[in-house]
Image: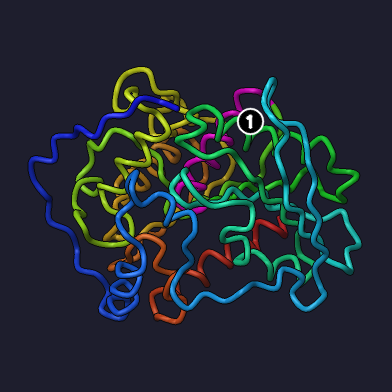
Amino acid sequence: MPETTDALPFVDTPVRPPFDPALVPVLDAVRQAMPTLSAETLSLWRQSELPDSEPVDFTAGGTVRVNERQVPGPDGAPDITLLILTPEAETGPLPAIYHVHGSGMVSGDRYTFVEMLLPYVSSGRAIVVSVEYRLAPEHPDPALVEDSYAGLAWTARNADELRIDPGRLIILGLSAGGGIAAGTALLARDRAFPKLSHQVLICPMLDDRFETHSSRMLDEEGTWDRNCNLFAWNALLGKRRGGPDVSPYAAPARAEDLAGLPRTYIDVGSAESFRDEALTYARRLSEAGVSVDLHMWGGGFHGFDLMAPDAAIARASISTRDEFIQRALGD
């Protein structure tokens, strides 16, 4: 487990945009249900569920086949578990969405948030593979991104068995999963395998340095503030956080060269900690010659469309992302 430090000179709290009024009641409920992430509350985070959450039928009424596979992890590391969701009426080969779950790099599992991808499987459009990576702080960097890469590489090598079209391999992650997905895409590029067709980075966690306006603007506000963010990055990197010895695979905002990455979708709320790093990453990808679809949603807090899906801003966000994924599946 890495040594950590909580020292960070938050000398001021920059102004933030207002939250969308329709989101505020949900935000208040989430804040009451989810304490600020810390060493004392980590166990609660690992046990908690979102307010009003209901059990998910991952078979989608019998239209989805649910399998789990133990596959080799990184060299010298334990095997990892992949959740594989396949249409029962699969005629294959189909595009694949490789899912990297969120929850701050310190909690969650292969089932976390994967229900948002079930419609692509139940409709027969895609196969979903969701990786369970080791968690910080028990398993510091590079365990998380190397686990993710190992699962992706296994998926690509076994595309024929899984009835996956290797030419349409999409990586997708939300929040911490978005950051790990971006790091995994960098590894895939640098190791020349596998070739990804797209990356979908949903409010991604990309930068450990706390140098941006938005990384400092939330203090006991929103769903993921600077205090949660500091704990999570310290859990992953320990005393290296913010220093010169952090890999771009752990914190993709540090990557000097973004050329050669797949077509990218990035979305983010205007009132969340990851706003500026997501906007900067999108700009830098574009400057490197990568095709990027970027969307910032005014008044959105972190994960707003997952937590308040019926709000107008969330419906717009979900619809826009879905349209991109549908096109990616058909490319």
Image coordinates for residue 184, horizontal then vertical, percent = 58, 35
Quick one: quadrant of the N terminus? Answer: top left
- Residue at image coords 65%, 23%: 191
Q: Quadrant of residue 223?
A: bottom left
In the rendered image, residue 331, in percent from the top left (x then y), is placed at 71, 55
**Does the segment drawn in magenta span residue 104?**
no
In the image, residue 215 above or below residue 191 = below
Which residue does the numbered mark 1 point to in the structure image?
188
Q: Residues within 10 Å of mark 1 (few under 14, many from 20)?
A: some
Left or right: where does residue 151 sit relative to residue 268? Answer: right
Q: Which residues are magenta?
A: 174-192
Magenta-colored stretch includes residue 188: yes
Q: Position of residue 86 (x, y in %)?
A: 81, 60
Any part of residue 265 in sight:
no
| 160 lies left or right of 15 | right
Residue kind at label 1, given as amino acid type: Ala
Q: Nearer the viewer, residue 178 or 297?
A: 178
Relative horizontal placement of residue 115, taking residue 300 as reference (left or right): right
Which secondary structure, mark 1? helix
Query: In the image, what residue occupies the spot 19% across and 34% down?
Result: 8
Which residue is nearer to you in this view: 87 or 260? 87
Q: Position of residue 316 (x, y in %)?
A: 45, 74
Q: Main secondary structure of the magenta part?
A: helix
